[in-house]
Image (cartoon, rainbow, N blue to C red):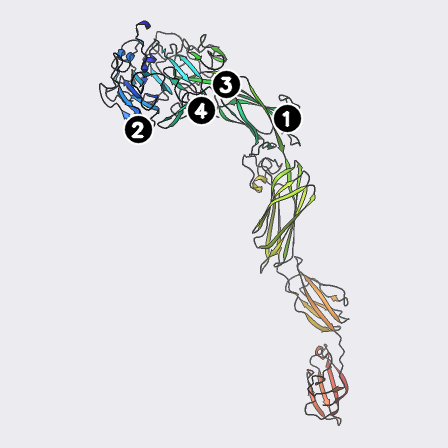
Amino acid sequence: MLLLIPAAATAEGSKELTANGGNRAYLLSSTNANTSFPFPTPGTMKVYAKAGESIYVGSSAQGKSSGTINLRAPDGSTYTSGASTTTGLISNRSQEVAGPQPNGNGYQPFIQPVAAGQEGVWEIDFISPTGGADQNSNPAPVAAYANWTQPNSQYVTAFDVSVRNAGNTAFLTGRVFTNVLSGILGNFITGFNAILNIVTRDGYLYTLDNNGQAGNGFTFFVNNKGFRNTNGSPSYQSVNSTINPDVQDPRSADTQSDITHKIFFNAPAADLPASAATPGGTTWLLNIPVKPEIAQVQFTGTEGTPGKAGTAPLGGNITFTATTNGTYTIGIDVNRNGIFNDPVDRQLTGIVNAGSNQVSWDGLDGQGNKVPAIAADYNVTVGVSLYAAEVHFPFFDVERNVNGIKLTRINGANAPEYTIHWDDSPLIVVGTPSNPVKNVNGISSLTNGHKWGATTTEDNDTDFGNNKSIDTWAYASVSPANQIINFRLQEADLEVTSITSAINCINRQVTCTVAVKNNGPADITGSKFMLNLPAGLTNMAVSSTATQGVSTVTAEASTAGQYTATLNMANGSSRTFQITGNINSTSAVVLNETASMLRPADVTDPDATNPDAAPPADAAAECNALRSGTGCNNIKVNTVTAAPIPNAGANQSVVLNSVVTLTANAAGTWAQATIAPAQTTIATPAATETKVSGFTVPGRYTFLFTNSNGCTATVNIDVFSAETTVPNIITPNGDGKNDVLEIANLSFYPGSQLVIFNRWGNEVYRSENYQNNWSGSGLADGTYYYLLNRKELSGKYTAFKGWIYLKR
């Protein structure tokens, strides 16, 4: 029969799908998903065309009810064949095989020229007569080479996309492809024999012979992962359902790691570019095969520090990039003996994705214990087995595949290569399962192309692939790639050992002293020290000294109520900070002082480590985090009260042997500052008001009053001799000397009486409270007599008599 079919070098579409016998697969053209068609399209095909070329299209549904052809150019322009019943209509099998006119016996195509700026990948939708509405009926089964009739349903029997060269002299092949193929055979017992060409993003080429795959309604596409695990890695297993399987939607744009490969109807044209514009952006086309390799291998702490990490609970991440998929085995040499697979060593295994990869390590060894911080590096070996040319063929609702597919890799190392793999072990067995059910070591598809189901003459859907999502995959293995890197573990117990304040009273200097220490075992660089002080502190000054070991301070900063600095501290070192300033207030002030040490990123502090991936930013959050729980030695708080400055009262002047009353304005204690001029006796030192006696020696006596904050005030008591002397002469001539009778120390005896007599005993002057102001006014020169009644502190009087000579 093959010899009877005309050989045409034109037309790309249903002609290729029927070129190898078997039965015709009608093209689904609908947006309604169901079990057989989980990723429906409106019959979408894609074609690469250059400016100056023309795109010729035709469809058996053209002009039949809603049947039409819509085109989208890379620049966003849209075109349609409209409702014509002639232009764009493929009427029969002969026209389908002949292709578009001017080919002999060809169909009359709808022609769309490719204008300047429209070069790239065009999208073409072959709309069915029902516009995609489901008619709930199967089309009539038709042999591949037989004549056919277009059904009034959501299926398109024949379709074609041909590219005419710019000179209008020939058609070009290898330009048409699709991302997903959804078709229906009309029954469950006939096979689909199309031979298709697969192009991978990494530049590898396969031919796929469907080889009689049977399943009535079916969907398949080609990608780089098949069905995925929840973390996005390939599962390398089939799935026991077609409802929402975890697989990259072939209608969606590729991501960095999830790729839908392209299904070409012919061998891809050699002049395809590496990438081209599409109506929604860009896509890859034909690339030079990518060499499988890894690069940018690096260890980074959980909080982002290259080459360093904290001990558990932090750990770190090993990252690398890979050009293809594969598997990894990472070994951490915990005992540092150069061997990476001892029981104590940690082994990490998993799947490699093309692109960026990250493998997390929790800081534990192979026996579940914390790997300790030491003053040396740990080594890590990163071994990667990569797969070039990885392709997966997810088949949906294919009840039986009795012959198995034939898959041939036609470029790359050891090509041609036929080996395929599968794992159907998750599937519930119905009918005839694959044999073996699990093939992960590889079998030639020429021997067993992943067969399942049984040959049957009954038109039913009861067999192994019914309502299943079955994956078949292939790849080219390459030699493992290995790299060794190293990292350092860091653990340091940082501590605020003390915080004290020397605070007297408001409006006086405050001195805060804070001591910090690195208890090790690791040296630390970049720890943040913070001291929060009262907002009213002014004229703040900070100094610090290394009190033990080696430590340095950088990045000091002071703001209102806060001082911060960055500390580098060797293991076992300690440092003391002293902060001074003034508290300005008119009343008592409560002062809260908080000192804290914050660990650097990727350094474990045993009792102050928040094990999330965010770098440490808040000492309290680190201090109160699990695993250590609330509280740590990294934070200390000191609360003191600054009281008002006390007042010890006014200074006083008294005579010898006086008893003096001292009165302060608050509670506190009295004390004599020194024993000079003589030791006094304070009656009640702890009283606000007290009597003081013992002023036996003239001079200045100083007393201290100290309140509960240790703030002091002073009062001076000046003590003078009690002797009173009366001069024998006054000369009131206005020369400022001896103009009045001035009795020494009389001011200490207020209320003293002075009486003056002449030589005949007559009283000439009297004062009941003499103020040292008698000048003999109105009296003649001569001798006069006085009587001084000195009033003692006790209230009694002491009499003094004598004479005075008055001379002007």
Q: Nearer the viewer, mark 2 or mark 4?
A: 2
The answer to whether 666 is drawn above or below residue 718 in the figure is above
The amino acid marked with disc number 4 is: Asp
Of the image marks 3 and 2, the number of the one nearer the N terminus:
2
**Label 1 belongs to which residue?**
334
**Label 3 belongs to which residue?**
387
The amino acid marked with disc number 1 is: Val
Q: Residue furthest front?
A: 167
- Badge 3: few (under 14), some or many (20 or more) residues near its Cα, within 10 Å? many
Mark 2 vs mark 1, CA separation in Å:
62 Å
Disc 4 to disc 3: CB gap under 8 Å: no
Of the image marks 2 and 1, the number of the one nearer the N terminus:
2
Q: Residue furthest bottom?
A: 760
Picture quadrant where residue 19 is located? top left
Does 594 sit left or right of 469 as displayed? right
State which quarter of the image contains the N terminus.
top left
Q: Give 687 or 753, whichever is nearer the viewer.
A: 753
Of the image marks 1 and 3, the number of the one nearer the N terminus:
1
Q: Secondary structure at mark 4?
A: loop
**Label 4 belongs to which residue?**
258
**Can residue 166 be seen at all in this image of the molecule?**
yes
Rendered residue at 70%/41% (across/down): 549
| x and y percentages locating residue 583 in the rendered image | 60, 56
The amino acid marked with disc number 3 is: Tyr
Does 447 sit left or right of 729 as displayed? left
**Label 2 belongs to which residue?**
77
